[in-house]
Amino acid sequence: MKTPLNQSESDRIRYVSGQLFTLGSEDRGLTDRGWDGQQRTGDRHVVAFSLRPVEVHFEGESPVILAPTTIALVHPNCAYTRQARSDRGQRTLFLSMDERTLRSVLARHMSIEPDDQHDLFPMRFGPSDVRSQAMAMQLDRLLLRDRIEMQPMEFDELAMGIVDQAIGAVIRHKGDARVCELPEHTKRQQRGWVDEAIARLCHDSGRQWTLNELADSVDLSPAYLSRLFRKHTGHTLSQTLTIVRLIRVIERLPDMRGSLTRLAVECGFSSHAHMSTAFQSVLQLSPSTLARSDRASRSEVRRALNSRLRVAPAS
């Protein structure tokens, strides 16, 4: 199925992009172009996982062997050269982001002022975090190999989790002196922001929300809002949006005019298949089965879904 995310492929590199992150996969055999001469990174910050050994020499630094046990933290516009250290060539996964997104992630782990000009990455290389690398490999398989359907908000949330986990592991390994615990907002404040974000999703459930847009609407960073949702609801933002859309579908089933495909699109799903997958995943039944049920059964399902949107009251 075609994903609504932007995809492209060029010179052995495949990309898929949301609003905050780009996931890239580079496969380069020993006889492919790109091994000779100086290369240059793009204009975004990069977290890279090398799945096969490759020697990389960034300008002004000592060469380093990138391998499955190593993560690279790369600044924009870095010049580098590389040499293969495997007879299978190079296979690298990377997630790129702009500076604002990087700062949003780093604020979770260290004290970063808005106008701070110091080197944002605490070090260029560090030990690869097994969990974040596995998550990156899974996202690569789903999006770039299997080409499954994924909504922009879900992609950015997954990418945010991978980068957050990977960078956090590097910072903890280094024991950076600037690492500190940021002041926690009160539970009442946190739950208020989560409630406000849920209200915005409910008000405009048909919109193709991105993580960045929803975070901006409640004046929080994307990384912080994503963590608050998991903490106070047990769901991700994309899971919450799916629940909201399912409620809208169920509300309209009795008075439905036209096909289920039209209803799916009007309620924010990209297709009938997307809606059916959500019904099976969340409710273990199909839309048509629920449409044929009685009013009491539909009301019971709707109440159960609404209960999953509630945030526990502040104590």
Image: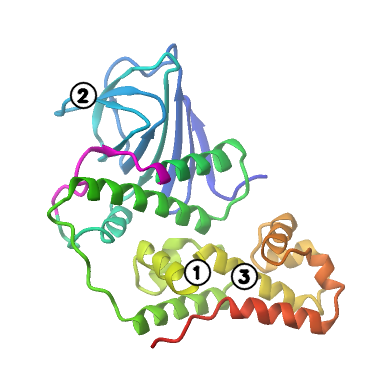
Q: Is residue 53 left or right of residue 110?
A: right
Tell me which amino acid carries mark 1. Gly
Q: Is residue 279 visible?
A: yes
Q: Secondary structure at mark 2?
A: loop
Q: In the image, what residue occupies the spot 52% across and 42% down?
A: 138
Q: CA distance from mark 1 to mark 2?
A: 43 Å
Sequence-wise, which precedes: disc 2 or disc 3?
2
Q: Is residue 135 left or right of residue 297?
A: left
Q: Nearer the viewer, residue 43 or 120?
A: 120
Q: In the drawing, what numbered circle is on residue 243?
A: 3
Tell me which amino acid carries mark 2. Pro
Q: Which residues are magenta?
A: 117-131
Q: Position of residue 267 (x, y in %)?
A: 67, 69
Q: Which residue is mark 2?
A: 63
Q: CA distance from mark 2 to mark 3?
A: 49 Å
Q: Nearer the viewer, residue 209 or 287?
A: 287
Q: Secondary structure at mark 1?
A: loop
Tell me which amino acid carries mark 3. Ile
Q: In the image, what residue occupies the spot 18% across and 57% down?
A: 179
Sequence-wise, which precedes: disc 3 or disc 1?
1
Dot 1 and dot 2 residues touching (CB under 8 Å): no
Q: Position of residue 124 (x, y in %)?
A: 22, 38
Q: Is residue 207 visible?
A: no
The quarter of the picture where residue 271 lies is: bottom right
Q: Is residue 175 above or below residue 314?
A: above
Q: Nearer the viewer, residue 187 or 273?
A: 187
Q: Which residue is mark 1?
A: 234
Q: Is residue 154 above or below residue 35?
A: below
Q: Quadrant of the N terminus?
A: top right
Of discs 3 and 1, which sits in the foreground? 1
Sequence-wise, which precedes: disc 1 or disc 2?
2
Task: Bin the neighbour count of mark 3 within 10 Å (Cα to Cα): few under 14, some 14-19, many 20 and up.
Answer: many
